[in-house]
Image (cartoon, grey):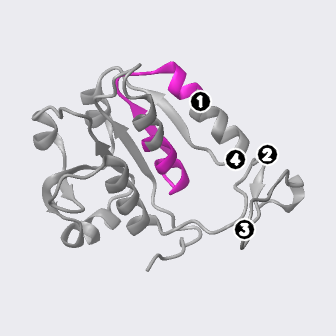
Amino acid sequence: MARARAEGARQKISVLRIGHRPGRDPRLSTHVALAARALGAERLFLNPPDPSLERRVGEISKRWGGGFEVVGAPEWKAVLRSFPQAVAHLTMYGEPLDELEPKLRGADPLLLVVGGAKVPSEIYRLSTWNLAVGHQPHSEVAALSIVLDRLLGTPGPGGWPGARQVIVPQRRGKKVIAPVAEALP
């Protein structure tokens, strides 16, 4: 069962996507960015950089609100080494999420690393933890979503600060409105 986010005590989480292949992986990397954004991460470091993807996700953030950003990262090792706290590499070869969850909650800020087709072996050594949501082949988007939901909870309905449009939950159909600025949190 998903938990609501605790106000005021929100853990700061960033995501590092390594092994992105511009021109070949835009859909998957966009899904990583969208899942990270929608489930409460603050930013996505994208290695290697892809200005087109950065621009597309930036437009989504402008339209739907929040402060999420995509930052091009030419060197993934530099991101890892400069991160001020803990790093959790999401891999099916890691320690179970249930066992690591208390440690992950204590790491603030936390960097979650998701790889591509070939993850450099160094990432296993440089990470604070190698974390598995399951020990079978699975999508990095699914793994990231599960970890973010566990740590931050499921976001509720309503607009985010700065949103130009907001979904109004419906039993059937779709309803999107342009919010009045005073009505937003």
Tag 2 near tag 4, CB within 8 Å:
yes
Question: Earlier along the polypeptide chain: callout 2 or callout 3?
Answer: 2
Question: Earlier along the polypeptide chain: callout 1 or callout 2?
Answer: 1
Residue 95 relative to residue 10: left or right: left
* Residue type at numbered disc 2: Arg
Which range of residues does the magenta coloring cover? 32-55
For the residues labelled 2 and 4, the Cα–Cα distance comes to 6 Å
Report x, y in % for residue 73: 38, 25
Crowd band around label 4 with a 10 angstrom C-alpha radius: few (<14), some (14–19), many (20+): many
Marks counted in the figure total 4
Does dot 4 land on a helix, a strand or a loop? helix
* Residue type at numbered disc 4: Trp
Q: Residue 59 is drawn in which quadrant?
A: top right
Report x, y in % for residue 121: 10, 35
**Residue 56, which numbered label?**
1
Q: Name the residue under label 4.
A: 64
Report x, y in % for residue 131: 20, 57
Question: Earlier along the polypeptide chain: callout 3 or callout 1?
Answer: 1
Residue 45 relative to residue 82: left or right: right
For the residues labelled 1 and 2, the Cα–Cα distance comes to 16 Å
The verdict on residue 116 being magenta is no
Q: Name the residue under label 3.
A: 169
Crowd band around label 3 with a 10 angstrom C-alpha radius: few (<14), some (14–19), many (20+): few
Does dot 3 land on a helix, a strand or a loop? loop
Question: Earlier along the polypeptide chain: callout 3 or callout 4?
Answer: 4
Tag 1 near tag 2, CB within 8 Å:
no
Asked whether 163 or 10 is in front, the reply is 163
- Between disc 3 and disc 1, the foreground one is 3
For the residues labelled 2 and 3, the Cα–Cα distance comes to 16 Å
